[in-house]
Amino acid sequence: MVLADSYPLGEVLWTIVIFFAFVIWIWLLWIEIGDILRRTELSGWGKVGWIVVLCLIPYFGVFIYLIVEHKGMSERIAARRSEQQQEMDQYVRSVASEQDRVGQIAAAKRLLDEGTIDQAEFERIKATALSG
């Protein structure tokens, strides 16, 4: 086979290793640039400086940033995840309370329709549910 003679298995494996090293570098670069741009304590010049370092010395720049900022990156990621979790919890509580209110009013309406409670009691339950 002509292809096997011109491109031996060792070179195929080496090409795969190089390709995955490039993909990992792109992934790390993406994460680090995102971290740099989200940093609030870093000035605009500091952000530009880090991005220039990442672009001028590509592989070493990524490793330098990981070495210098590893603790700060992990703290910022943990803080961001905590904020996102709090926002999600707040959203779920707000939606759940809205559903709870709607459920209370629907149950009161059902009791009113069945004749178990009167209109005044229904209005009181409705006002209570809507108030909080």
Image (spheres, grey):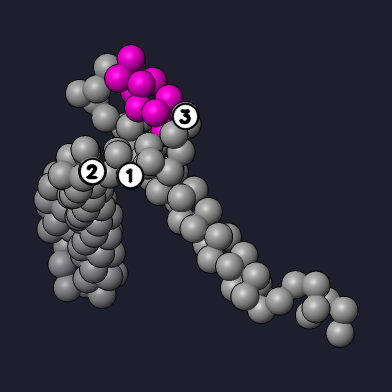
The spot of residue 35 in percent (x, y) is 32, 37
Is the residue 101 above or below the residue 111 in the image? above
- Using the image, tell me which numbered label, if any, was put on residue 67: 2
Which three-letter amino acid code belongs to the residue tagged 1? Phe
Quarter of the image where the N terminus is located: bottom right
Q: Does the rendering let one see residue 16?
A: no
Query: Residue placed at 30% from the left, 39% from the top?
Result: 64
The spot of residue 17 in percent (x, y) is 53, 66
- Using the image, tell me which numbered label, if any, was put on residue 63: 1
The answer for how far apart the CA atoms under marks 2 and 1 are is 6 Å
Q: Does the rendering let one see residue 124?
A: yes
Is the residue 64 above or below the residue 85 in the image? above
The answer for how far apart the CA atoms under marks 2 and 3 are is 17 Å
The answer to if 114 sits in the magenta stretch is no
Which SS does the magenta portion mostly show? helix
Which three-letter amino acid code belongs to the residue tagged 3? Leu
Marks 1 and 3 close (CB-CB < 8 Å): no
Local SS, label 1? helix
From the viewer's perspective, is 39 left or right of 122?
Answer: right
Region in magenta = 44-54
Which sits earlier in the primary sequence, circle 1 or circle 3?
3
Which three-letter amino acid code belongs to the residue tagged 2? Ile
The answer to if 50 sits in the magenta stretch is yes
Local SS, label 2? helix
Query: Residue placed at 47% from the left, 29% from the top?
Result: 56
The spot of residue 96 in percent (x, y) is 23, 59
Local packing at callout 1 (Cα closer than 10 Å; few below 14, some 14-19, many 20+) is: some
Marks 2 and 3 close (CB-CB < 8 Å): no
Local SS, label 3? helix
Marks 2 and 1 close (CB-CB < 8 Å): yes
Which sits earlier in the primary sequence, circle 2 or circle 3?
3
